[in-house]
Structures are given as structure tokens and as C-alpha cells.
Image (cartoon, rainbow, N blue to C red):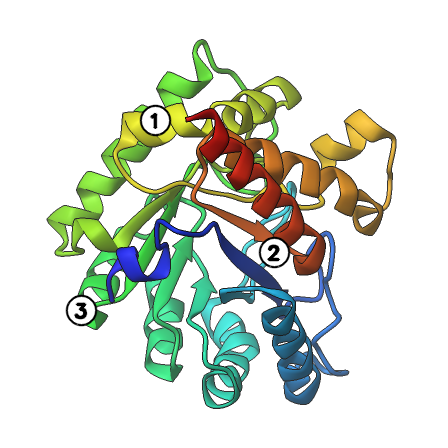
Amino acid sequence: MNWTTILPPERVTIVGVLNATPDSFSDGGRFLLDGGAPDIEFAVQEARAMVEAGAHWIDVGGESTRPGAREVDAREEIRRTRPVIEALAKHLGVPLSIDTRKSEVADAALGAGATIVNDVSGLAFDPALAEVVARHGAGLVVGHLRGEPATMQQGVRFDAVLAEVAGELRAAVRVAEAAGVASEQIAVDPGIGFGKELEHNLALLARAGELRERVGRPVLVGPSRKAFLGHLTGDESPTARDTASQAACAVAVFAGADAVRVHEVAGARRAVQVARALREART
């Protein structure tokens, strides 16, 4: 796998979110049956709809990492995600990623047909995850997160958010490279909403291009439906934040982001197409 293929320079890559969890902040429980087993048919239907709307790959998660979320056992995470990934790999012709912090879950997902690992912890939770990615020859998105989802919004402090996030992401990239993950297979995510206050999230989105230059890797941003947007707009329901999400994605792309991770694909696709055209007109 080569990131110049997955994140080609002629487009903004759109990643569609599919959470096989009971408690994710936006779509928790949508793809689970009574008893916690995944609803495979519904998951395939929804993923196909996202691809038809313009998603270039689908990100499957089995553990909520919303603020305050508790850790899920790896076996349960695998039970939720592996059947979904196996089915999507059979029915869809797009790359699949596994949203996990755990090497055991990543190994199972990559064996089931995923080709990318999206680790919000930036390899801090389970350093062995990088070795799994390297062994499979998979792609890797390293996210920025200080601490754990359960406590990440407590005592948040940055003196220079862009410089600090860039430095910590560079360190995570070095860990991945030392484990054998090829540089061209690594992208970074500044962790919008992960241990950040409103002003930190805004700065990281508005300066996405500068982050890209500092880290030297493609940048994926994920502001979709997050609470900081509700603080700005007054929209309490996550699903009511899609317009604000599209605006945040557009700004990040105009600033230089390479990819966006979203729940509602069609509107995001239109927003980033315009933002990319404006970015090109500026340069």
C-alpha cells in the first residue's frame, strides 16, 4: 500500500465513519443487534451508501473514544468489528481502516481485510501496534492524544498547541518508522476533540497546512459532529452539527489538510471540493 495512492494529490480524501459500538457519541448502537453482535447487513448497506456519496474509504471502530469513555476488552472489540470488516471487504471496492488502539484488534482486522490502522493514541497506548502494521504492510494514521479518553478533557494545557502537537506527532511517526512502517504509509491526525479545548481545536484546523509542513506527513482531520462545534453553534444534538462539520472540514482543507473523516459524506464532499478549488486559486 502506498499513501500516494490512498491520498492522491488530485483530491481530498474522504473517510466515512462506521462505529460498531453501543456508546459512540454520534452513531453508537446503530450497527449492533440485541446482545451486542454486529448487524452485518445494515452495516454493509450504510457503508455502501457512504461510498456512493463519495467516501474513499470506510473507518470501522469497535471502541468509543469519546470524552469519558471506558476501555473495551480487545476480544469484545474484535467481536464487534471483524465480521463487519470481512463483509465490507467482500462487498465494497474501497480501502477499510480499523479504528483501534490495540495491536490484537489491529491484527484481527488486518487479517479480515482492512488495510489501514487508525490509532487515536498515536501508538502511546500499545507500542506493539506499529509492529503489527509493519508486518501486514498496512497503512497507519497516528493521532494525537494525551492521556486516556476517560480523562483526556481534565487539566488540558498547551503553551503552543501547534508546535506541541506537531512535535508529539513527529515522535509517533519515528516510533512507527523504527518498527518498520514505511514513511509513505503514515499519515497524521491532530486529534480534534481529543484532550483539546475549543481554542486548540480551532487553531489546529485553521493551521492544518502548517501542521503538515512541520510533521512532513499528510494530515487527516476529524472534526465531524464534535462537541466544540456545538459550543459554537448551539446545536446540542451531534446529528444537528453536520453543517458546522462541513464548514470545519472546508476550512481545514483550504488551510492544507489532505483528508477528512466524517459521518455525513455527501455534504462534506461538496464542502471540501469547493475548499480545494479555493486553495488552488490562492496558490
Query: Which element carries disc 1, helix, strand or loop?
Result: helix
Mark 3–mark 1 Cα distance, whole angstroms, equals: 26 Å
Disc 1 to disc 2: CB gap under 8 Å: no
Pointer 2 residue: 64
Place of residue 23 in the rendered image (x, y in percent of width and height, measured from the top left): 71, 59
* Residue highlighted by disc 1: 166
Q: Amino acid at mark 1?
A: Ala
Task: Say what amino acid the circle numbered 3 marks.
Answer: Arg
Query: Where residue 254 appears, x then y in whole percent?
Result: 52, 32
Q: Dot 3 lies on which element? A: helix
Q: Give the residue drawn at x 71%, y 83%.
A: 42
Q: Residue at x 29, y 40 (%)?
A: 217
Camera-side mark, 3 or 2: 3
Sequence-wise, the earlier of marks 1 and 2 is 2
Q: Which image quarter holds the C terminus?
A: top left
Badge 3: residue crowd in 10 Å (few <14, some 14–19, many ≥20): few
Q: Name the residue at 70% across, 41% down.
A: 245
Q: Which residue is mark 3?
A: 135
Q: Nearer the viewer, residue 111 or 214?
A: 214
Does residue 102 appear anywhere in the picture? no
Nearer the observer: mark 3 or 1; the answer is 1
Mark 1 to mark 2 CA distance (whole Å): 25 Å
Q: Tell which circle, 3 or 2, labels the residue nearer the N-terminal end.
A: 2
Res 122 label? none
Q: Tell me how far mark 3 sits from mark 2, CA to CA.
A: 26 Å
The amino acid pointed to by label 2 is Ser
- Which numbered disc flags the more N-terminal residue, 3 or 1? 3
Does any portion of residue 106 appear in the rendered image?
yes
